[in-house]
Amino acid sequence: MTQIKIFDTTLRDGEQSPGVNLNQLEKLEIAKHLERLGVDVMEAGFPASSQGDFEAVKKIAETIKSSTVAALARANKQDIDRAWDAIQYAQKPRIHVFIATSPIHMQDKLKKTPTEVIDIAVNMVRYAKTKCNDIEWSAEDASRSDLQFLATIIEKVIDAGATVINLPDTVGYTTPKEYGEMFRYIKENVPNINQVDLSTHCHDDLGMALANSIAAVQNGATQVEGTINGIGERAGNAALEELAVAFKIREDFYPYSTNLVLKEIKRTSDLISKFTGMVVPGNKAIVGRNAFAHESGIHQDGVLKNTQTYEIITPALVGVQSNNLVLGKHSGRHAFKDKIDQLGFTLTEEKLADAFKAFKQLTDRKKEVTDDDLFVILMDIQTDV
Ligand code: KIV
Ligand code: ZN
């Protein structure tokens, strides 16, 4: 098994989700959950972006002990100073410096030539290195950059002291094959690449963030960046809980492991959803409300006989208390009786038939029947002796 490091950026890229604005206490609580979840690195924020973010990153750096705490900085001295001021007291600090390397970003956004971009990147990595030993360098928009240019700049920033090289698919444009090939090219064409961790950072604009991240790992990436619940800029980032559980469930196929404590996933996800206000879609893999729910009678019957008929993940593995047999119009008598037993009611065959009839009538008016609804039905039946 190859150990893959998990770099969580929920508190930085995740907070860049439109409409999300976490206060210091919320960021700190999320950081504690992330540490308990076992992330190797947490990017606590972008200290140069605001005084509030600076304070929050500083507090997190002073509190978190086992995860590396990273702070983001553009490739300029002011940002790097601000990042270092915020994280210098962390047990394991990391400065994360980035600059764009794609033609469109260099020409139209930075208004710099490729040679100027190399100079800035090298000088700023060198500068950051005078403060902190652990320096991550990101080639923003790497997936739309020229491969030869990428190889050249990467070799130079490693010589300047970078310890991690991150190649983001900043705009979520790449495909698994193309992104994997980029990692293979860099592994094969940058002579000093084995001195550093090679990292993937994917956005989900085309719904391929997870597949792209896995392709990068299969081609030499040793660090995966992403967020919990997949939140982040625009369509979001790769969802780390999906990656870790996919590696675990398909370890026959993926010889990779992570340090994530899987049973912490659900409560971490719930907390982040609550604090960010970003509701997790019901059908979201691993953490969605319906991820372990079975609605159709055929599925419910199968799961009651053997959970593995329709469940590839045990809910307890990710901290979900039990599977959830949602009672709706497709539910059968078997699932209904099971639920009644769970609620602690013992009914005669006749009463059970009456209750089932009342339940079916209710499903014509209501999509999902809750425990409270069942209590009403059952109490009606009990009083009708
Ligand atoms: O998507 C991106 O390119 C980023 C960088 C700042 C790492 O978030
Ligand atoms: Zn990003």
Image (tube, rainbow, N blue to C red):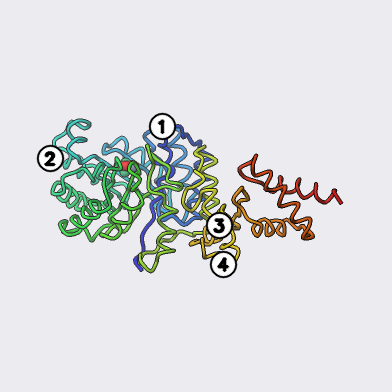
Residue 284 locus on image (x, y percent): 47, 48
Numbered disc in front, either 1 or 3: 3
Residue 230 locus on image (x, y percent): 42, 46
Between the residue at mark 1 and the residue at mark 4, the CA separation in whole angstroms equals: 53 Å
Q: Which residue is mark 1?
A: 50
Q: Which residue is mark 2?
A: 115
Between the residue at mark 1 and the residue at mark 3, the CA separation in whole angstroms equals: 35 Å
Label 1 with label 4: CB-CB less than 8 Å: no
In which quadrant of the rendered view does residue 353 lie? Answer: bottom right
Between the residue at mark 4 and the residue at mark 3, the CA separation in whole angstroms equals: 20 Å
Disc 3 residue lies near ligand 2 with CB under 8 A: no
**Mark 4 vs 2, N-terminal side:** 2
Residue 12 seen by the camera:
no
Tell me the amino acid under the disc marked 4: Asn
Q: Residue at x 42, y 47 (%)?
A: 227
Numbered disc in front, either 1 or 4: 4
Q: Secondary structure at mark 2?
A: helix
Q: Residue at x 16, y 51 (%)?
A: 151
**Mark 1 vs 4, N-terminal side:** 1
**Mark 1 vs 3, N-terminal side:** 1
On residue 306, the disc is 4
